[in-house]
Amino acid sequence: MHKILSYFPLSVLFSVIFLFLGVEANAQPSLEIWFNAVGADGATVEHVTEYEGSAPINATFYMNVTNGDGWDMKYEWRVCHKDGSLDNPYITRYEENPTIQFSSAGTDSIALYATFERWNSSIGQMEVIEFKRDYYTYDATPLTIKASESELTFPNAFSPNGDGINDFFKPKTFKSIVEFRAIIFNRWGQKLYEWNDVNGEGWDGSYNGHQVKQGTYFILCTAKGADGQVFKIKKDVNILRGYTKDDPIDPEQ
């Protein structure tokens, strides 16, 4: 290699170097954007452009800039509803990597509006490159986050017998629940258990460290969904300790 270079004309070598540097200097910046999302269940997904799940959803937005050396960059993250316009966002953030919580049901679009500027001494003026509405309308798809409509249901029975099946009384299904409070009573109105996290473990069929008798108890639950729906649930809770994993409970009974 060294022997070959010793015979390579220096003028040609410098020309190649300057040509290479010129190409790099004239390269236009480009953008790639994505986000990491943490759903209501605490699970995290990374480096995605679309996400659908239960609210609240916490998303942190990121960008990758190619050919950005030498350019000054201004960034503006915009969020609009599905039927809205990125020209009129309901959230605007100017941090490089903002974290935004989505707590309302529906689909949102998110885009990064960026401006690159640098002084070009060869032409004696400022160069400006913008990634704005036209870029996202025709050349790329904004990021999308969809928070599902709210839902909350409970089973009628459970079997806290330590077999690992139906040992806790908790919601059977839930989506986009942003407020939650549930209380278990006995037939005389005595409060036995209360919890305030829809993702919580639920009631294990005990009171003051002792298992309660098999029979019928009651739940009173009030909750609110991301779409504004209010849930007021009052129903029987049947403890059936004799059921095992080989004789499962029908959650609708």
Image (cartoon, rainbow, N blue to C red):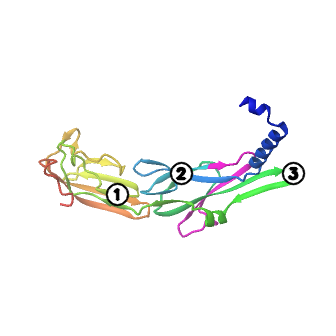
Locate residue 97, reporting x and y percent.
60, 48
How many other residues sit within 10 Å of disc 1, few (<14), some (14-19) or many (≥20)?
some
Q: Quadrant of the C terminus?
A: bottom left
Residue at the spot of label 3: 122
- The reply to whether residue 88 is in sight is no
Q: Which residue is drawn at 41% across and 63% down?
A: 149
Q: Nearer the viewer, residue 108 or 2?
A: 2
Question: Residue 245 vs residue 153: left or right?
Answer: left
Residue at the spot of label 1: 174
Q: Residue at x 77, y 48 (%)?
A: 25
- The reply to whether residue 139 is in sight is yes
Circle 3: residue type: Ser
Q: Which of 16 and 191 is in front in this view?
A: 16
Q: Residue at x 42, y 47 (%)?
A: 43
Question: Residue 21 vs residue 46: left or right?
Answer: right
Q: Residue 35 carries which label?
A: 2
Range of residues picked out in magenta:
64-91
How many other residues sit within 10 Å of disc 2, few (<14), some (14-19) or many (≥20)?
many
Q: Which of marks 3 and 1 is nearer the N terminus?
A: 3
Mark 1 element type: strand
Circle 1: residue type: Phe
* Closer to viewer: mark 3 or mark 2: 3
Q: Which of marks 2 and 1 is nearer the N terminus?
A: 2
> Residue lying farthest left?
242
Res 228 → quadrant? bottom left
> Residue lying farthest bottom?
83
